[in-house]
Amino acid sequence: MLALCRLRGPSTALLQRANATLHAVPPAADTPPPPPVAKAQSSPPPPSETPDASDSKANGRRRRRTPIPPKRPNISLANPRQWNRPIGLGVIPAYDLALELIQRDSKFLVHEAAALREEVKVLESKVVELGGWGSEGAKDVEAEMEKNREKLKILEVQSKVNLPAVRWEVDNAMADMTNPAHRHLVEHKWRKDGDLDLLMERLHQMHVIPDVLPDLRPTIDVHVVAQTTSRERVQTKKMRTTVVPGTFLLPGQTVKPLHVYANVFHTDTRLYTMLLVDPDVPDEENQTFRTYLHWLKPNIPLSATTRGRIDLDGHTPYIPPHPQQGTPYHRYVLLLLPQPPLDGVTHSLNAEARAEPGVPTSTTLDIPPVEPAERANFDVRAFVQRWGLDTIPGGGAHMWREVWNSRVSKIYKNVLKELEPRFGRPPKEDPYLEYKEKKRYI
């Protein structure tokens, strides 16, 4: 008879994992017992490790932290900063030589401009001796002085335009419009970086030229700022947005008067007339379109030192755009037209040099406010011809588009206080109408 008994030995069998199976391995007789496990002592963190780094470790694993990009400080004329070299002196010898060459050339041009400026002063004294400005005897001297001023303007620009500090200041919104080099860079950026090209493309592509004016050659960079939509206000946290020429705006964005800004590149103060028109109002009687005047302000003084929003109040009040229901999109064109110069004065470099700060060199026009009944049939070309507003030598322009929505009905009710018209396509003639009206059975 078999009997179960407990094996007596120094230790029980050990289990060892091998190839996903468990089998008994007898212990070796000469194997010493394992040493006692010592309690781990916490050692202080190394001096290079920061508390943030130690806190980022949890259970032996490191937490991944998203690096926070550094915030660039605000730079503007109100909060200016100074340009610093991107690399230290001697790091790249070629850069040091190039910078030295630019500075040497700048000093040479500054001395050349100073010598030419003395020649201009001598010519000014000759003009006084020959009878003064505009006299017959001083015409040749004035023409020579105009050429010297053109050359002087080029030298003043070239002497500073290549300096890294000058370009850095202009690129970082610290342009000083009294500095010829800064004015040149701002105007060059507007003309060559695509803003002027986009404006002229939209004016021609959407037939603003020649529907409103036969020709227009802007020399002023005009910016229009409108209210943002509710969605944009939530996403961007901004109350206003810059209008890109030719884009669509909602009627609710233009209920309040828009903010208009202008970058002007002449140093003397000249007067301009602002017009805001809609050339796409239907004319049912003549089966064509007529122009509606929304805003008018003459005698606006502008110069290179003009900053901030242009004051457009105090003349013909602003009427919000109200595209009629059933019509295609409407083009809203803002024009900034130069007024004629004073008698005996032409806009030239000599005139700019003689102009006193803040004193206009243009004729003040006594344009009466436009009555509400005259807004609906406003003739832009006749207005320009009557008051001598020439669009060829300069001025500014901007445009955007709008279509009807329910907000327009409120404008007709609360602002215009008149019945809202509705337009649509005429009904098609039914060729079978005569047969439909006859009785089929007698």
Image: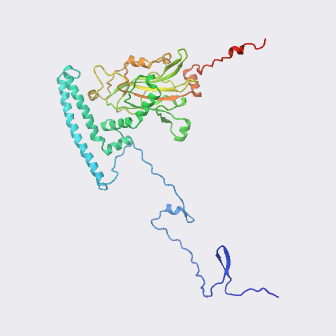
Q: In this image, 420 relative to 72: left or right?
A: right
Tell me the quarter of the picture where residue 406 sits. top right
Q: Residue furthest right?
A: 1
Name the quadrant of the C terminus: top right
Q: In the visual, does 304 lie left or right of 151?
A: right
Looking at the picture, the colour scheme in use is rainbow
State the image coordinates of residue 11 (x, y, percent, origin top left): 67, 84
Instruction: Where is residue 33? Give x, y as percent.
Output: 60, 84
Closest to the observer, 110 or 71: 110
Quadrant of residue 337 within the rendered picture: top left
Image quarter hosting the N terminus = bottom right
Question: Is 64 situated left or right of 151 in this image?
Answer: right
Vertical arrangement, residue 165 with respect to residue 1, above or below: above
Q: Quadrant of residue 407?
A: top right
Residue under the image location 43 percent in, 33 percent down: 198
Residue at image x 21%, y 38%? 112
The number of discs equals: 0
Residue 47 percent across, percent down from the top left: 45, 66
Q: Residue at x 28, y 48 (%)?
A: 99
Classify residue 253 as left or right of residue 273: right
Identify which residue, 254 or 212, lies in the foreground. 212
Residue 278, percent across and down? 49, 23
Reply above or below: 137 against 85.
above
> In the current view of this chain or complex, which residue is farthest to the top?
442
